[in-house]
Image (spheres, grey):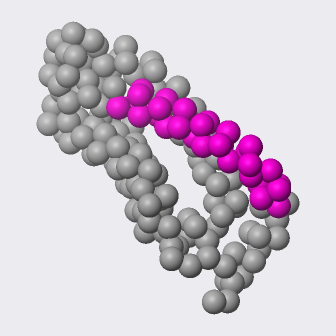
Amino acid sequence: MEIAPWEMFIRSTALHSFIRDHETWLWPLMQSLHYLGGSLLLGTVGLFDLRALGMAKHIAPSTLHRLIPWGVGGYLSNMLLGIVFFFGHPDQYFYNDAFRLKLSLMAVAGVNVAVFYGAGIFAEVRSLPAGADASARVKVVTGISLAGWVGVLICGRLITFFRPPFFH
């Protein structure tokens, strides 16, 4: 099978060479950091989403929302690490259905975040006191968020099991 031009480009970069030359120690380190970033993301955003869906009503959603910057940090670190993973083994990711589904779910979650903050839903959640129940539209958006990020986590784990049957 012939190597695609985009893959030839990636394989010609210094980043690809560095990863391949130091893979023995670099790959486990990056995976560990990637898992920590995912834990920050799902731990903070997931907790906020669960509260909006009706769990732990004794906590005001605005209190949990203060943790969201940690989740954003986890997301950003995972995006950077994901790019490094991709540059290390582009063929194992690009041709992988679990990876493609993961990217699709990340896109859905990203659009959902834009809806959450852009359509006034956050303002509604921010004003909820402890003990109050969120509206149906808040529950739909936070349910999509929770399902999307859990799906991203699951697909990330499945990447290993659905590697393409060929390698260049």
Residue sitting farthest toward the bottom: 1
Q: Is residue 123 something that shows in the picture? A: no
Q: Quadrant of the N terminus?
A: bottom right
Q: Is residue 87 something that shows in the picture? A: yes
Residue sitting farthest toward the front: 24
Q: Quadrant of the C terminus?
A: bottom right
Residue drawn at x 67%, y 83% as measured from the top left = 4
- Residue 62, by quadrant, is top left
Residue drawn at x 46%, y 52% as measured from the top left = 156
Q: Is residue 119 left or right of residue 28?
A: left
Q: Is residue 27 left or right of residue 22?
A: left
- Residue 30, by quadrant, is top right
Residue drawn at x 51%, y 73% as measured from the top left = 164
The magenta span reads 17-46
| SS majority, magenta | helix
Position above or below: 168 against 56: below
All told, the count of numbered labels is 0
Position above or below: 24 against 57: below
In depth, the one of 153 and 75 nearer the eye is 153
Q: Position of residue 154 (x, y in %)?
A: 38, 49
Q: Position of residue 113 (x, y in %)?
A: 40, 42
Position above or below: 103 against 71: below
Q: Magenta includes 37?
A: yes
In depth, the one of 68 and 128 nearer the eye is 68
Q: Position of residue 23 (x, y in %)?
A: 74, 52
- Residue 102, by quadrant, is bottom left
Q: Position of residue 138 (x, y in %)?
A: 23, 35
Q: Magenta includes 119?
A: no
Residue drawn at x 28%, y 13% as measured from the top left = 60
